[in-house]
Image (cartoon, helix red, strand yellow):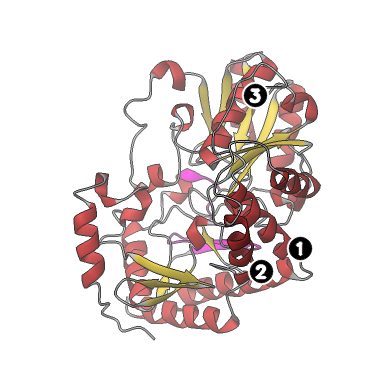
């Protein structure tokens, strides 16, 4: 067990220098530990279920580079495939056979996808799909849900989740009202609110986009009938339904949330896992809709590094590994043990908490709950979460430095890792 007092001298030195070079010292806001206090640890290397920082501390990792490391960090088969691919070059800027291979794997796996376009991030995928929704329907307005995060594009930075929620920021400066005026918001799990928006904006709404299982406001599962209801409402109004499966795709089931829940959207965005740890994103759906995308159709979207051969290689190998029999059963069993264990420990300690899991995705809120939407999530005790995060960090457990982020497990996590994590949680909560 790691000492309760971490050695962080080198991390502190590196982060101090970084703050003079980059805004807040980071390349993405949630990394800064601003919402949990203290300074971030600076990573040195990752392997399997573990992280080592520059001071030599080792941690069990439940962030998994924010989702992609479902097979574990630096999986030897992924690394081997990347070494071979490197010999052929790092970027083509032209078609490659690898794109076909990964595209076929994605199309075979995800029920809604008949054609796919690769991009470089989840943000890019969501930007493109929002443009495609409007182009296909000829309508300008889009419904999103409070606390859901679809990247940092202007139109989505309205009551957003992830780092926006973590830092308690209002809608971002620099985003024109003329852009956000076409973004309508509803509470997650509230079908009546969606119906009201369609009634108030007849013939103007291009579609609805959502995280089918929210991970960017903490882990929030859909209520029974919610996804089915959205499918019915959008069909009734001839609008499109888009599942942002950047986080849930290939994580809560091989075919994503749409396979898990049996609700098929018109379009889907993907990322994280399909790049095997390298930058990647994708969007896809029905052929008649995807035919609008240039050069087949008039809706323009492009990217020099899209379909990058290294990202395609890592994605192909990762999806191959996930197809091994028993993978998702193992992930679900292990994550359920972790989630139920944390809730049991909290109850025994007299700590108000709620949470849950689906396959390799989980969450814990420090509120009695239940949590059905972002407003419920905001009732969580952020002071307790900060103390919990620090206590776990000191005991060698690395969790997302935000109450408003889901946690992730991988096939590399062992029963011993789960037991160590629960033992650390018991120590932390008992100290309160």
**Residue linked to disc 2:** 331
Compared to residue 387, the image places residue 120 above or below, namely above
Above or below, comparing residue 92 to residue 390 in the picture: above
* Residue 235 rendering spot, x and y as whole percentages: 76, 26
The answer to whether the residues at label 1 and label 2 have Cβ atoms under 8 Å apart is no
Left or right for 164, reference 148: left
Task: Give the CA distance from mark 1 to mark 2.
Answer: 13 Å
Q: Find residue 30 and report its horizontal and vertical position in percent.
A: 37, 51
Q: Going from the N terminus, do you reach mark 1 or mark 2 first?
A: 1
Q: Which residues are magenta?
A: 354-374
- Is residue 172 part of the magenta span, yes or no? no
In this orientation, does residue 224 appear?
no
Question: For mark 1, does the 10 Å Cα neighbourhood hold few (<14), some (14 to 19), or many (20 or more) residues?
Answer: few
Label 1 residue SS? loop
Q: Residues within 10 Å of mark 3 (few under 14, many from 20)?
A: many
**Rendered image: mark on residue 133:** 3
| Mark nearer the N terminus (1 vs 3) | 3
Tell me how far mark 1 sits from mark 3, CA to CA: 32 Å
Q: Residue at x 70, y 47 (%)?
A: 98
Find residue 360 and report its horizontal and vertical position in percent. Answer: 62, 63
- Around disc 2, counting alpha carbons within 10 Å, would you say few (fewer than 14), some (14 to 19), or many (20 or more)? many
Q: Which residue is mark 1?
A: 323
Q: Quadrant of residue 14?
A: bottom left
Could you tell me residue 295's position as x and y percent? 68, 22
């Amino acid at each position: 067990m790691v000492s309760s007092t971490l050695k962080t001298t080198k991390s502190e030195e590196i982060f101090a220098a970084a703050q003079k070079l980059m805004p807040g010292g980071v390349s993405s806001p949630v990394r800064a530990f601003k919402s949990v206090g203290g300074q971030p640890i600076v990573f040195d290397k990752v392997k399997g279920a573990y992280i080592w920082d520059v001071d030599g501390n080792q941690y069990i990792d439940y962030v998994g580079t924010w989702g992609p490391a479902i097979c574990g960090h630096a999986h030897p088969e992924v690394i081997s495939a990347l070494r071979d691919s490197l010999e052929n070059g790092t970027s083509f800027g032209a078609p490659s056979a690898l794109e076909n291979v990964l595209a076929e794997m994605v199309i075979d796996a995800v029920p809604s996808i008949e054609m796919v376009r690769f991009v470089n991030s989840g943000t890019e995928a969501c930007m493109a799909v929002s443009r495609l929704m409007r182009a296909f329907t000829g309508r300008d307005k889009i419904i999103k849900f409070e606390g859901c995060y679809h990247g940092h594009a202007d139109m989505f930075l309205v009551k957003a989740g992830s780092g926006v929620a973590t830092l308690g920021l209002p809608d971002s400066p620099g985003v024109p009202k003329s852009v956000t005026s076409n973004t309508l918001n509803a509470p997650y799990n509230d079908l009546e609110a969606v119906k009201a928006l369609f009634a108030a904006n007849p013939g103007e709404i291009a579609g609805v986009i959502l995280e089918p299982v929210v991970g960017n406001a903490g882990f929030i599962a859909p209520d029974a009938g919610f996804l089915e209801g959205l499918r019915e409402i959008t069909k009734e109004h001839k609008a499109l339904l888009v599942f942002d499966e950047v986080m849930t795709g290939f994580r809560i089931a091989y075919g994503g949330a749409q396979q898990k829940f049996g609700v098929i959207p018109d379009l889907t965005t993907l990322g994280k896992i399909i790049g095997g740890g390298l930058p990647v994103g994708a969007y896809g759906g029905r052929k008649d809709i995807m035919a609008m995308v240039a050069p087949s159709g008039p809706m323009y979207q492009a990217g020099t590094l899209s379909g990058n051969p290294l990202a395609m290689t890592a994605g192909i190998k990762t999806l191959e590994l996930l197809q091994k029999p028993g993978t998702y059963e193992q992930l679900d069993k292990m994550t359920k043990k972790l989630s139920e264990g944390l809730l049991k420990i909290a109850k025994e300690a007299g700590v108000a908490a709620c949470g849950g899991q689906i396959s390799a995705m989980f969450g814990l809120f420090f509120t009695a709950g239940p949590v059905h939407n972002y407003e419920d999530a905001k009732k969580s005790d952020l002071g307790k979460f900060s103390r919990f995060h620090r206590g776990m960090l000191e005991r060698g457990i690395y969790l997302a430095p935000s109450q408003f982020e889901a946690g992730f497990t991988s096939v590399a996590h062992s029963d011993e890792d789960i037991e160590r994590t629960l033992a650390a949680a018991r120590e932390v909560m008992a100290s309160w």
